[in-house]
Amino acid sequence: MEHYPRWQKNRVLQALASRRVLILEGPRQCGKTTLAKALSAKGSIYRTHR
Ligand SMILES: Nc1ncnc2c1ncn2[C@@H]1O[C@H](COP(=O)(O)OP(=O)(O)O)[C@@H](O)[C@H]1O
Ligand SMILES: [Mg+2]
C-alpha cells in the first residue's frame, strides 16, 4: 500500500544530515515507526525494545 506523504519528511531529513540523534515524538499509531523506517539510511539496522 502506498503511504500518505508526511509534512515533516524534509525537516526530518534535514535534521538527520547534521545530527546523530533525532527524537520523533507523537501519539501511538500516528506513523512514527513507518516514517523512521522509510527515512533511515540504506543498510541501517532497526532496533526496538521489547
Ligand atoms: N504515511 C502513512 N500513510 C498511511 N498509513 C500509514 C502511514 N504511516 C503509518 N501508517 C499506518 O498507520 C499505522 C501506525 O503506524 P506506525 O508507524 O506503527 O505508528 P507509530 O510508530 O507512531 O505507533 C500502521 O498500520 C501504518 O501502516
Ligand atoms: Mg512505533
Image (cartoon, grey):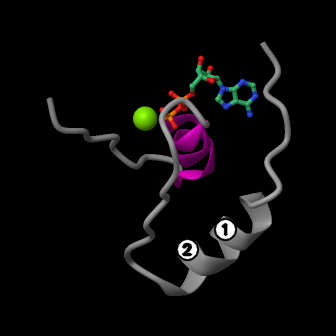
Q: Position of residue 20 (x, y in %)?
A: 39, 78
Reply above or below: 24 against 46. below
Circles 1 and 2, Cβ within 8 Å, touching? The answer is: yes
In the displayed structure, does residue 25 sit left or right of residue 49? right
Quadrant into which the C terminus falls: top left
Nearest the eye: 35 or 30: 30
Q: Position of residue 46 (x, y in %)?
A: 34, 40
Three-letter amino acid code of the residue under disc 2: Leu
In the displayed structure, does residue 48 sit left or right of residue 18? left
The secondary structure that most of the magenta stretch takes on is: helix
Quadrant into which the N terminus falls: top right
Residue at image position (54%, 29%) is 29
Q: Which residue is mark 1?
A: 13
The kind of secondary structure element at disc 1 is: helix
Q: For the residues marked 1 and 2, what is the alpha-carbon distance in whole angstroms?
A: 5 Å
The kind of secondary structure element at disc 2 is: helix
Query: Picture quarter containing residue 38?
Result: top right
Three-letter amino acid code of the residue under disc 1: Leu
Reply above or below: 12 against 5. below
Residue at image position (79%, 48%) is 6
Q: Which residue is mark 2?
A: 16
Furthest-front residue in this view: 27
Residue 26: numbered disc: none
Q: Which residues are magenta?
A: 31-41
Residue at image position (52%, 41%) is 37
Q: Kindly tell me whether mark 2's CB lies below 8 Å from ligand 1.
A: no
Q: Quadrant of ligand 1?
A: top right
Furthest-left residue in this view: 50
